Image: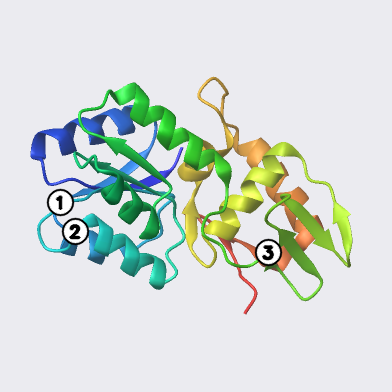
Amino acid sequence: MGKILLLEDDANLNETVTEFLEEEGHQVVSVYDGHEAQEKLYESKYDLLLLDVNTPGINGFELLKEARASKVLAPAIFITSLDSVDDLEKGYESGCDDYIRKPFVLKELKIRVETLLKRGFFHEAKETIAISSTISYYIENNELIIDEEVVSLGHKESKLLKLFMKNDDTVIAHERIYEHLWDYDEEPSDTALRTYIKNLRKIIGKEKIVSIKKQGYKFISEK
């Protein structure tokens, strides 16, 4: 499950895709022109970008190229009717991760979206992310390194830590954490979440994960 920015100027397709993705459990912020998408990009962090190419204001290619230059790391899928090799090349050069051509079936979109969301980190130039002076996260192997030694994490703790690092210094609502940690056939548990938080705090430090009363949790990044 993820927070998705959808740029699509066709009102019917925009509504159809939004409803479909929300039914799949994702949070969707939908816009109809490039300028509005540009504003939304810098107001919040997203797990995935779904961008039409030929849009009013700023086209999808230019929007993503600018976003990548501004260190927006979220993966991106272009939704477009363009089908030439040159257009495909231009899309990937601007920083996209996938390309889906119109018309498409919603199940195909679902597969492409979920595949990218499962990968973890995107367009990250660094090999590691510093959590503290002695703790770092090795992106390629999904390994937590403390004092130069690998520390094992449980499956849920690992997913939770990656969610925190992708949304550092941002309050993450309980509901979003539930959606990220538990699959559709699992029952979320507040007690279990507190246990995962407690386990992570023991490893990376209590001060790194702040509980915000009635809102959620905030991960404090390394400055």
Residue at image mark 2: 59
Q: Is residue 177 left or right of residue 150?
A: left
The residues tagged by marks 1 and 3 sit, at their Cα atoms, a distance apart of 35 Å
- Residue type of the residue flagged with mark 2: Asn
The residues tagged by marks 2 and 3 sit, at their Cα atoms, a distance apart of 31 Å
At numbered mark 2, what does the secondary structure look like: helix, strand or loop? loop
Residue at image mark 1: 54
Q: Residue at x 26, y 41 (%)?
A: 79
Would you call the spot at circle 1 few (<14 residues within 10 Å), some (14-19), or many (20 or more)? some
Q: Residue at x 19, y 58 (%)?
A: 59
Rendered position, 50 above or below 39: above
Tag 1–tag 2 contact (CB < 8 Å): yes
Would you call the spot at circle 3 few (<14 residues within 10 Å), some (14-19), or many (20 or more)? few
Would you call the spot at circle 2 few (<14 residues within 10 Å), some (14-19), or many (20 or more)? some
Residue at image mark 3: 127
State the image coordinates of residue 104 (x, y, percent, origin top left): 25, 27
Rendered position, 33 above or below 82: below
- Given this view, does label 1 or label 3 mark the residue nearer the observer? 1
At numbered mark 3, what does the secondary structure look like: helix, strand or loop? loop
**From the image, which quarter does the C terminus lie in?**
bottom right
